[in-house]
Amino acid sequence: MNFLRGMLLPVGIIACWFSLSKLNQLNSFLIPSPAVIYQTAISLFSSGVLLNHILISLYRVLLGFGITVLLAFPLAVLVGLQRNIERYLNPFLHFLRQIPPIACIPIIILWFGIGEKSKLVVIVLAAFFPVFLNCLEGFLKCDNKLIEVGIAYGFNKHKRFFQIMLPAALPSIILGMRLGLGYSWRALIGAELIAASSGIGYMIIEGEQISRPDIVIVGIVMIGLFGYLVDYIFTIISNWLMPWREEVDDGSRSNQRAV
């Protein structure tokens, strides 16, 4: 039912768009009709061009995000466990946090060229702070009373981390990774729009250069669809890792209905 309600707005927009196109109220060169967009998407998909660009972009996002997690999560654990380190890292990290990754693209291209390395660097810069800061917040907010209970039961540091701190920080970790994945996707498209020879962003800029707004719109729609799909899959994984969240949500909804 929620899915059907959520589809009302996009279906309504497409219906209005289609009606205005049929009535010749839109410039067909600048805003092609939904039928033209659909035909272009089918043509690009049948030729393999669209699928190739999508797979390349997804590969870059997943690889860059994986590198980000390998860098950000251990650093968050280190700072969370050794809190004295935070006062040394905090000013520098917050300085870097204020710099948009897109602003770094020119210097990144000078250093790494327009190959895969530059795009991975952009993704890492975009996703690092959402992952790191949320993971760190999860560890810092761990209830000290739980740790004291673990000490009372004779838990060593290893056991306290994996059985107390990590489960307590897991919601923040999942949130940070979900945000980081979204930032990765958006940063990659920005990098591909500026310097790339493949990927969805490249397909969009190529469509603009050859005056094909239908290709541009297909690319934009694909970005939204696959960004939504990746986020949805990540949500399913997070619910599997934290099944108690669904139970809490269901309980809160029941209480609200009862009230």
Image (cartoon, rainbow, N blue to C red):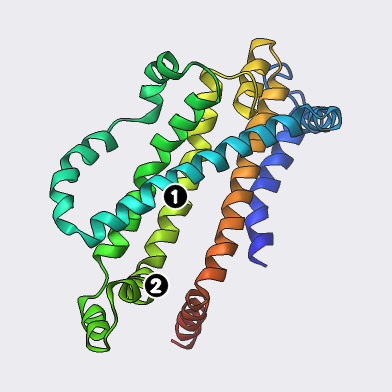
User: Where is residue 25 drawn, in percent x and y?
Assistant: 71, 24
Judged from the image, the secondary structure of the residue bearing numbered disc 1 is helix
Q: Which mark is residue 167?
A: 2
User: Closest to the observer: 172 or 167?
Assistant: 167
The residue positioned 64% from the left and 43% from the top of the image is 226
The residue positioned 58% from the left and 19% from the top of the image is 196
The kind of residue on which mark 1 rests is Leu
The kind of residue on which mark 2 rests is Pro
Horizontally, residue 154 falls left or right of residue 3, namely left
Q: Which mark is residue 179?
A: 1
Instruction: Give the number of marks.
Output: 2
**Mark found first going from the N terminus, 1 or 2:** 2
User: Where is residue 219 drawn, in percent x and y?
Assistant: 66, 30
> Which quarter shows the C terminus?
bottom left
Q: Give the label, 1 or 2, closer to the camera.
A: 2
Image quadrant where residue 59 sits: top right
187 above or below 240? above
Could one spot residue 26 in this view of the protein?
no
Residue lying farthest to the top in this orientation: 210
Horizontally, residue 174 falls left or right of residue 81, namely right
User: Closest to the observer: 172 or 229?
Assistant: 172
User: Where is residue 200 drawn, in percent x and y?
Assistant: 64, 29
